[in-house]
Amino acid sequence: MREMHHSTTLNNDSCRSSDSDCSSKNDDSEYTTRPRRSKRRQNPDTVGKKKLKLRGPLISKRARLPIELAQYLGEAERHLNNDEFEHAERICYQIIDTAPQASQPYIVLAEISFRRGNQEKAKEFLYQAAQRNPSDQNTWLTLMDWAEEAEDFPLAIHYARQALRRNRADTSLRQRLIDLCHVAGRSREALQLRLAALSVTPESTGEEQFEVARELADQFFKLLDPHNSVKAYENAFEQYPDHGTDNDRNSALSIMLQMKRYDQALKFFTSFCGVKLYLNSGDLFDMDRHLSKLSSVEKFKRCEFPDNMAVELQLKLFLILAHLGLGPLVVSRVESTYTNENITKYSDWLLDIVVAYKEKNLYSIAIQLILKLKKSNVTCKLVQVWTLLAECYLEAGETESAIKAYRHVIENLDPRHTGARLGLVNLLRRLGRNQEALKFLNPSNLVQKGVKPEISLTEQCDLIVQKREKSPLKSSHRSTAKSFAFSDLQRTSVVGDVDSDECSVEKVCLDSDWLDASANLVSRDHVAYRLAYERCRMLDTPESVDSFLEEAWALLFSDVTRVCGPRFTQLALTLDSEQHRKLVIDRLASVAPALTDTLSNQIDAERSTTETNGVSSSDIWGLFLRVVDVLRARLPKSLPQLETATAWASLLPHVQGNDLRRLAASHLLISSSLIARHGTPAFLELRKIQKQWSEYNQYWNVMNLAITLSRDFKHCRFLDRLVTKDSLNLAIGTIASSDTLVRGSYRYAIARLINMRGKFPDDALLTLLLAVGFLSMAMQKHIGSRHLAILQAVGFLGEYKRLRGDCQEVYYNIARACHQLLITHMAIHYYEKVLAMEPIGNNPEEKSVTNLHREAAFNLALLYRTNGNPAMARHILQKYVVI
């Protein structure tokens, strides 16, 4: 058995009060069991002097036992040594009841549990003892040993940390804790422990200290922890300030500059590099005492540093001083370092110094330094040098010099440099030279050559309108007619026969064309894409709104036209074919940034897109909304363009990659399609959001409108499935039954309506549809008994009148039924009743919506004219119809 590290002992006061009792206890070999101590019997005369060393660390004041309880605990230990566990346990619990904060009884209880074979209970008691006396290192070590044996390394690390707090100079314990962290996979904690050891127990020599510091700094830097990486170097320099090399100083300072810890870097220079800053009072600058004076360069007199300081260290010192606003102190020394040799080796550091002076508004100094770089053969062709020179000229008020610098970059160095072009354009706009600025924003000279020019906005929309007007999908034979464009779609899609060699060859050709087109997409050229976007923003003025519309259209939808191929008439299919739309979306997404589902991924993708080409998805979405606003202001003339724009916007990856934008684009497409009286694209979009909005009557009203305006029967199966799934939904049943009546399946519609009427007996619309169904069935050529169908229609019309009440709608529908049955006198009677009634509504606006006077008057005039009374027909039209 692993014995306990120590047992309970008497405190100092008890020994002083009763030397004889203490001596007798310590003379008893069975009183103490110390496996980590010597068990030699002690001389009673020296017990009082050596008891602290023998008994380990002092017991905390709260954990001490009074003399009486300490003697009583000795009885428990005697019982324990005699294997009388019950007596010893009872005594310990009695002591705990009297002194609950004492730790010694828990140690005895832990020993009892361990001897009984209950190690878990022993751990609990020993942990209770450690909590009551945290300064006892041996207790924590025992707990650490047990946790390590059980392979509970996180718990062992916790106990080891508690033990190390009692003796931070214990190198063996610290190394054991480091080993435990490595075993537990906590490499960062192990490195932090090694870093702490550098200051607590430094290495014997400076070389060893810096070797360990370099190793720790590299590992911390790889773990993206620059703070501890710098700390490793600082600890080494604090312990052995004369043993560090220039490479060590450079490494530490580079990390500080990367973190932008300029004040810490200046303190490092003043502490370990021999740099001295003098105040105006003549006092030497101390970072700890004079930190507040760093904000004002006027409080400093001069800066001194060793002449033999390495050039790289000097440049970093100049950079730090410039960032802290102390650059004017070393201007002459900075200018002397801008030699050809230094520019060749340290051009990056020299450019950073110029940027630091520019950020502190010291433009004259920055210009002098840049002109030195401009004269060097190494940096005279660097774009960064010229753009930085232009920015400094601009801030200094020398606009013409700034324009020359920007033009030099664009015309001689890098025509595709976006920053230079945008800087020049903004400068020209400030000077009022807008036309010249637009020339530099023209992306045509940046786009790859060999690409055919895009078809214009007007030509695209005209082709779509012509395609719709020439489409053979008429209402009389929708299910059998097939257009040429639809056959093109079948060839483009993957629905064709896989076994057909001809289709396979044609699909390979189409894919080859797609790959050629995708290489020339505008979105692939980030520079041209950014310039085109900035050009659109510049043209977005009332004077140039037409040019803005053309440029924005090309930027937004030129990729869509390339993906769809040279036959632009196929673009009309994006409104009517969900399959073709999905194909275009997949192809556009294959060359665009990856579409993501979660919000965090969407934000990351948008940030990466902005960093790549400077145009974010939000920018493109805002441009599209601006195009929609311009087209809405031009309605109804711009209706084809508006419908096309909303249809193509739903294909863009910038819209598809965001849930809110995708939903908004879908709503815009529905609205524009319904305004243009094209029901199919609106139906396709409404079908996607059916689960989300099916509980609202407004949704079914819009769905009914889209189905009514639809030119095909794509909605039939959809409605049949909905009715089958949800037979208690009145809106679905009503729309499906009405659609069945329109298709001519009267008996099927009547059967469905009778079933619905059994569930909703008080709904007047169902009764009206039943009357219409029987009336339409009576008009068929082949029917057994027309009279029975007409009687049923009349009966349902009467029921409809009872449920709906007296209003214009009821009498108008009855008059229409009589008009259809050629019962002229009754039709005239009900039409006249409609004309005599006031429409339903609380205000003129509501009454104008429900008013049927014009419809009834027009039908009544037809009846009068048919019966040979044109004068009466003319009178009715003049009274109710003519405005």
Image: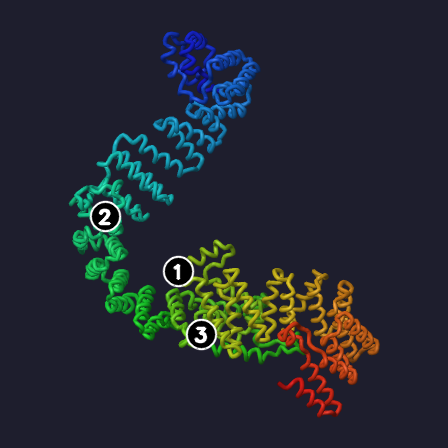
Residue 79 locus on image (x, y percent): 53, 12
Observer-side mark, 3 or 1, equals 3
Camera-side residue: 52 or 834?
A: 834
Measured from the top left, where is residue 686 in percent x and y?
Answer: 60, 66
Residue type at mark 2 is Leu
| Mark positioned earlier in the residue sequence (3 or 2) | 2
Image disc number at residue 612: 1
Determine crowd level at label 3: few under 14, some 14-19, many 20+ residues with C-alpha closer than 10 A. many
Q: Position of residue 344 (x, y in %)?
A: 21, 55
Between the residue at mark 3 and the residue at mark 2, the CA separation in whole angstroms equals: 54 Å
- The foreground one among 815 and 105 is 815
| Element under disc 3 | helix
Looking at the image, residue 741 sits to the left or right of residue 112; the answer is right
For the residues marked 2 and 1, what is the alpha-carbon distance in whole angstroms? 34 Å
- Residue at which label 3 appears: 549
> What amino acid is found at the position of numbered circle 1 in the picture?
Thr
Q: Which of the labelled discs sits on residue 317, or is there none?
A: 2
Q: Nearer the viewer, mark 2 or mark 1?
A: 2
Gap between marks 3 and 1 measured at Cα? 25 Å
Examine the rendered structure and indicate whether residue 221 appears above or below residue 826: above
Q: Quadrant of the C terminus?
A: bottom right
